[in-house]
Structures are given as C-alpha cells and as structure tokens.
Amino acid sequence: MSIKVCKFGGTSMADGNNIRNVIDIIKSDRDRRYVVVSAPGKRYSNDIKVTDLLYQCQKEVEQTGACKEAFSKIRERFENIVKELGVDMDIATILNQTEQRICTENSADFAASRGEYLSGQVMAGALGVPFVDAQDVVIFNDDGSFAAEESYMLVAKALADKPRAVVGGFYGSYRNGKVKTFSRGGSDISGAIVARAVLADVYENWTDVSGFLACDPRIVDHPQGIKVLSYKELRELSYMGANVLHSESIFPVKSANIPINIKNTFRPEDEGTMIVPITKYQYTGNVVTGIAGKKNFTVIHIEKSMMNAEIGFTRKILSVLEKNGISFEHMPSGIDTMCLVVESAILGLGVLDRLLTEIEQAVNPDHVRVYNNIALVATVGHGMSSSIGTSGRLFKALSDANVNVRMIDQGSSELNIIVGVADEDCNKAIKAIYREFFPAN
Ligand code: ASP
C-alpha cells in the first residue's frame, strides 16, 4: 500500500459541509493515511478566518487579561462544526480549556496555533483516528529556524504505530515546549514535513483551486492551468506571489523527491498541478510555464567609475546591509554600476537614510539614486533555456504594450527572466507577456 499525506486548507475546513467533502475525499482512497489540517478559513468573502480571530483573542488578552468576546466567535464556529458533523466529542470542555490557556500563555503564537489544534482534534474525532499534537513533534531551534532532521525523526516515531492519524498544521514548539507557528499559510509546510517524515509517495495539498495557473486570474481572464511544474519553477513562482502554496513548503519534500499534487476539494476529479523534481519533469512544449509579479520594491542604484577594479567593493556594500539586518532580492550590476533591489516594506522609517549614509561612507560612490514603487515581474520556465529568441519576444511584447523596463535580471540557469517595471505597469506587463507566450487564450 502506498502512502499519501493530504493537507486540507482553510476553505476546505471552513464549515461542517466542506469538512464532509474532505472526509469523503479521505475515505475514497485508502492510501490517504495521514491528514494535516488548517484552521477553519472564510465561509464567505467578508467572513473572518479563525486564525485572525485568534490573533484578536491575543490582543484582547493583552488589553484586558481575558478574551471572552473574541473567543465567543471561535467557540460558536467549532460548536457548529461539531454539531453539523455529528462528532461525538466533548468540544465544550476542549474549548473552555483552550480559552483559559490562551489567557495564561499570553503569546500570539500560542493563540494562533489553537485554530489548527482544534480543527485537528475535530477531524480526528470525525475520522475516528488518533490526533498527533504538532507541539510534540515539530521542533524549532532557539533562533526560530525549523529543526528539520529532529522533526522528521519525531514525526516518523509518533506515526510509526499509527496506520492513520491527523496532525494539526502551522505550529510546533521550541525545545522548551513553548509553541511557535510558521509564517501565515504555514500548514502547507507542516503537510510537507509529515510527507517527508513518513516518506510518502505523494503529498496532496487540497485547496480551493484546481492547481496553479499560468498567471493570476485577476489579471488575465481564465489563464491556462499548469499541469506539471518542477520544484524550481514552483519556488520561483510562489516566491514571486503565486500564492497557491507557501513558498517554503517545498524544502522538506524536495530532499526526498516526493511529488506534490495540488488538488481542489470542491472539484476532486480535476487533475490539479503535479510538482515534481527535475528528473521527473517532462517538457510540455510550452516555452514559458508561468508569469508572476510582485509590487513595492525599492532599487538603490550605486554608481562609481572603475567600480569593477576596486577589490572588495561589493563586500563593503553587502556588509552595510548585513549590519543593518537587511536582505536584498536581486543585485543586477554593470561595469560601473550596481543595483540593490530591496522590499520597500523592510526599509522602515529612517532605515533607508541610514543605509545610504553608511554606503556613502563605505565606498564613496560617485552617485547613489533611489527608485521607489518598482514591481518585479518574473517569467519562469525550463523551456526558455532551449528556445532561441525568448527574451526578444518578451521585450518586444513589453515594448508593444508601452511598458518601460527599468531593470533586467536573468539567471544563468535561464529558468527565469525578471524585469523591473513601475508598480502601475505591473499588471500590464504580465498581460503582455502572457499574450505573447499563450496566444491561444
Ligand atoms: N491558519 C493559518 C493561516 O491562516 C495557517 C494555514 O492555514 O496554513 O495562516
């Protein structure tokens, strides 16, 4: 028998009706043995996700020492779910204990983790299988990084005597037992951890869309679906904002070559997208696999004559960034110029001025210019490396659409071409590139 690990996202877990779909999906395939769940998400567009309600609980605790009001909404949601599903469990007692612990722990991570903790317990009750608390098996180092090998070992040990089980996504704990969460959307990472720990044949990630699309459907109507993606393409696209899957969820499965299948809980018959290692990747004939864009970058353009001959120039600049705890996204350079592309959000009040002063002191440049409101648009695809003229087509499409390209960055892997454009040209650029490479749509 093969092993499938299935992760169900917030919409799939939003109410009793949706959870019934999830249960049918799990029961329809005996290989679906380990289930990782998110907290209940939105039931309708202006609904509030349980995780957001839990962050509100923490705020209430900080202000008043209790969280009666915010927690009452969570209580109602879980009581309804349990009633709708007809699960035989003492949810009232579990909810009372949870509310109390949110007050005594007084930690945002602890509060936020309770959505997955509760939905894991309900799902385990509904399926009649054991619940494994991620707090005991997903471990973080003191610096907040994920302790991969230790966690895989603990998860594997906890599941070794359980042919089926449910694990709550999104959280784990430090070695002292204090609960810590991954970043938002992190249940995708938890699912990948469980898949890696049990060496699953496939990691099924069930969500509310039928896989990745070649670009954002809010920008282009009905873009083509992507049937197969390589891990590398996925990393590029999800990092650039294609947010079907958390961009870090690929690391655990990648080391064991476990494919990820993105599936739609509400259209389970759809194939979805298969994400595979490059060794199993088959060229589909498409030069470009997908296009994604991200706005709000700042470009720091540094110019100095003979920069190329000045040994240590780049190191000095990067030391300034390191000293200020700033990471950069790209660093395109010329003979006498160099650009640092940084997310504007991390250049808070006074940070940019301090960086500029320190860069001035470190390398004495001829000019430094700052460009704000820059968007990066990434065109991604393994097919690009073997097709002559791809960049020509791309830049012609942009110029025909009257988009001014401010920066170009193409990795030597030829997996992607990144262009920097003004924020307001971002969607126009994506549309133009899409039309060029997906003309039938
Ligand atoms: N519930 C968490 C969030 O809303 C984690 C997740 O759903 O993956 O971000």
Image (cartoon, rainbow, N blue to C red):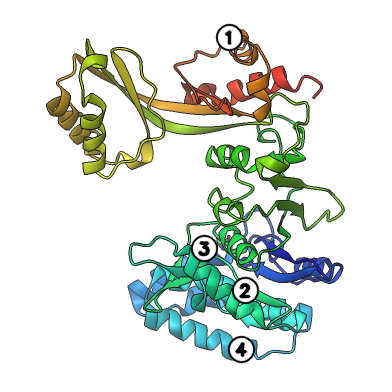
User: Which residue lies most toward the front here?
Assistant: 279
Local packing at callout 2 (Cα closer than 10 Å; few below 14, some 14-19, many 20+) is many
Horizontal arrangement in the rendering, residue 406 relative to residue 430 (left or right)? left
For marks 4 and 2, give the CA distance.
21 Å
Classify mark 3 as within 8 Å of ligand 1 or not, answering yes or no.
Answer: yes
Q: Write the residue at 65% across / 52% down.
A: 257
- Please report whichever mark, 3 or 1, sits nearer to the chain's N-terminal start: 3
- The residue where tag 4 is placed is 92
- Please report whichever mark, 1 or 2, sits nearer to the chain's N-terminal start: 2
Tell me the quadrant of ligand 1.
Answer: bottom right
For marks 4 and 1, give the CA distance.
62 Å
* Res. 108 in view: yes
For marks 3 and 1, give the CA distance.
43 Å
Instruction: Check the image and report above or below for 339 versus 197.
Output: above
For marks 3 and 2, give the CA distance.
21 Å
- Please report whichever mark, 4 or 3, sits nearer to the chain's N-terminal start: 3
Q: Are marks 1 and 2 in contact (CB under 8 Å)?
A: no
- Please report whichever mark, 3 or 2, sits nearer to the chain's N-terminal start: 3
Q: Nearer the viewer, mark 4 or mark 2?
A: 2
Give me the disc on residue 399: 1
Q: Nearer the viewer, mark 3 or mark 2?
A: 2
Q: Amino acid at mark 4?
A: Ala
Q: Write the residue at 34% across / 42% down.
A: 346
Instruction: Check the image and report above or below for 343 versus 12.
Output: above
Local packing at callout 3 (Cα closer than 10 Å; few below 14, some 14-19, many 20+) is some
**Towards the viewer: 316 or 246:** 316
